[in-house]
């Protein structure tokens, strides 16, 4: 498999060669994550109610993803920076530390969440009617926690070595299995909602096997090694940088709990189903911009470690421009064809019509997502922990959560207030993050130019 040449390839080619397989992987991963909801929403007789009940499980799923990303996306930029410095020994230690953290944390999370699943879901707002669907589903889903964390968390290290196509295939294995197994377990075997969870766990296991095959195989230069006692070198650095990804995921979990709680009180269980649909549409629309950002990240980190400020600036510019163009086009598309997205998850006409206005409100300022993702990606890629963590907290915890309670009650907007909180935070949070990134990064890249003695003190094109 051809490896991306971060040393000699052009910035555009490096990003495209990394981002395109990532985009395919993200789309596949998206199918992996939402195919359960597509099938569950179509279960005859109780699909709409079950869809809302499964939506109440999202905070737990998001929390697991937060820990996964803390060790995966937290360590991968450090791994890439060390590769740029040609420090392979430290890069190997970072990869192995991340693997051990994923494994240990996955075991702990599985045990704790299994023990308290019912109580946790009750706190999230589940009533007895929702609990009969959500508790069995999440308990089966949790048995695959370790599989999911290793397969997803170690993928960034495969991509960081330039093997983005292999990273894509690891996701493809699980997604194809899930798409095939879901209808089999849900409808053919008659397991309903529980069948969706069983299919997901089997798919996560297959994906993990593929990842481990690469990490233990000949193509991987940075082998997993097992020693006694097992140590965790560079764990602090990985966690501190990955904390921004963890906080972002955890704040998404908090937002999900807040939204579902307020919607249950102001609109009823049907509006939780609406939010489940909108959250799923959000995942669809976020997928390409995430691929662009994650595709640019190894290039930014590698060239930053190799002291190539011009290439760092070019990568940031390309990433931001592509993200802004994409979000503008998608905003137009969703405004013109909203039902196209809603119908993916439900054939209930009443639910489709109810979801139209919330969908328009929620995505009103979608273009500003590009500014948020661009800024956050650069902060993580350049190992700027404080900025990455602050802006993860700023948009969600400082803005979205308070607005979710303030707008429906203090401003008497009802359910509209819940869906309006997101675009307000997108505008303010996105612009603040991107502006701070520019103000922080441009002076640093100028300084790198001067230290190189390049005779060019102008900033890279940003």
Image (cartoon, grey):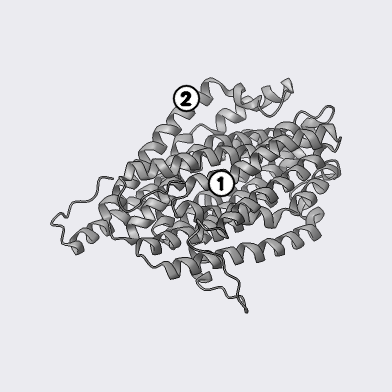
The residue lying toward the viewer, choosing from 291 and 245, is: 291
Quarter of the figure with the C terminus = top left
Residue 347 shows in the view = yes
- At 83% from the left and 36% from the top, the residue drawn is 192
Q: Are marks 2 and 1 in contact (CB under 8 Å)?
A: no
Lower sequence index among marks 2 and 1: 2
Residue 400 numbered mark, or none: 1
* Picture quadrant where residue 338 is located: top right
Task: Indicate the position of residue 196 as horizontal and vertical percent values.
Answer: 76, 40
- At 50% from the left and 24% from the top, the residue drawn is 333
Q: Would residue 299 appear left or right of 288 to someone viewing this image?
A: left
The residue lying toward the viewer, choosing from 431 and 37, is: 37
Mark 1, residues whose alpha carbon is within 10 Å: few (<14), some, or many (≥20)?
many
* Picture quadrant where residue 188 is located: top right
User: Is 153 located above or below residue 410 in the figure?
Assistant: below
Question: Which residue is most to the bottom?
Answer: 229
Please tell me whether mark 2 or mark 1 is closer to you in this view: 2
Q: Would residue 204 appear left or right of 167 to someone viewing this image?
A: right
The residue lying toward the viewer, choosing from 54 and 12, is: 12
Give how far apart the Cα atoms at labels 2 and 1 are. 24 Å
SS for callout 2: helix
Residue 332 numbered mark, or none: 2
Mark 2, residues whose alpha carbon is within 10 Å: few (<14), some, or many (≥20)?
few
Task: Indicate the position of residue 330 as horizontal and vertical percent values.
Answer: 48, 29
Task: Indicate the position of residue 278 as horizontal and vertical percent values.
Answer: 62, 34
SS for callout 1: helix
- At 39% from the left and 68% from the top, the residue drawn is 87
- At 36% from the left and 50% from the top, the residue drawn is 5
């Amino acid at each position: 498999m051809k490896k991306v040449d971060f040393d000699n390839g052009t910035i555009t080619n490096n990003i495209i060669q990394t981002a395109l397989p990532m985009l395919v992987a993200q789309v596949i991963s998206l199918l992996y994550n939402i195919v359960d909801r597509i099938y569950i929403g179509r279960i005859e007789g109780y699909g709409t109610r079950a869809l809302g009940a499964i939506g109440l499980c999202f905070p737990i799923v998001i929390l697991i993803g937060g820990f996964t990303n803390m060790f995966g996306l937290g360590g991968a930029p450090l791994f890439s920076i060390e590769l740029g410095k040609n420090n392979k020994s430290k890069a190997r230690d970072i990869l192995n530390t991340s693997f051990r953290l994923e494994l240990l944390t996955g075991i702990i999370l599985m045990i704790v969440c299994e023990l308290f699943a019912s109580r946790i879901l009750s706190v999230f707002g589940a009533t007895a009617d929702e609990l009969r669907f959500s508790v069995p589903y999440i308990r089966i889903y949790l048995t695959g926690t370790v599989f999911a964390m290793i397969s997803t968390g170690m993928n960034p290290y495969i991509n960081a070595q330039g093997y983005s196509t292999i990273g894509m295939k690891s996701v493809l294995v699980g997604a194809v299995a899930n798409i095939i197994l879901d209808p089999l377990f849900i409808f053919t075997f008659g397991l309903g909602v529980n069948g969706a969870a069983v299919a997901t766990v089997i798919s996560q296991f297959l994906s993990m096997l593929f990842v481990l095959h690469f990490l233990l195989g000949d193509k991987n230069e940075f082998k997993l090694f097992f020693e006694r006692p097992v140590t965790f070198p560079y764990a602090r650095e990985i966690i501190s940088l990955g904390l921004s990804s963890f906080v972002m995921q955890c704040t998404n979990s908090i937002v999900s709990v807040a939204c579902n709680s307020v919607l249950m009180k102001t609109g009823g269980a049907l509006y939780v189903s609406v939010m489940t649909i909108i959250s799923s549409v959000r995942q669809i629309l976020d997928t390409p911009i995430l691929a662009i950002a994650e595709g640019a990240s190894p290039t930014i980190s590698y060239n930053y470690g190799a002291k190539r400020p011009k290439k760092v600036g070019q990568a940031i510019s390309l990433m931001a421009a592509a993200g802004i163009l994409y979000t503008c086009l998608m905003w137009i598309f969703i405004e013109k064809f909203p039902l196209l997205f809603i119908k993916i998850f439900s054939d209930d006409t009443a639910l489709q019509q109810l979801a139209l206005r919330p969908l328009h409100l929620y995505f009103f300022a979608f273009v500003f997502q590009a500014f948020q993702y661009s800024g956050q990606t650069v902060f993580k890629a350049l190992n700027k922990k404080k900025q990455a963590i602050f802006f993860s907290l700023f948009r969600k915890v400082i803005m979205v959560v308070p607005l979710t309670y303030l707008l429906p009650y203090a401003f008497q907007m009802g359910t509209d207030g819940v869906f309006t909180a997101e675009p307000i935070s997108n505008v303010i949070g996105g612009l603040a993050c991107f502006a701070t990134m520019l103000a922080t990064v441009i002076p640093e890249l100028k300084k790198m130019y001067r230290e190189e003695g390049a005779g060019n003190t102008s900033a890279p094109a940003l």
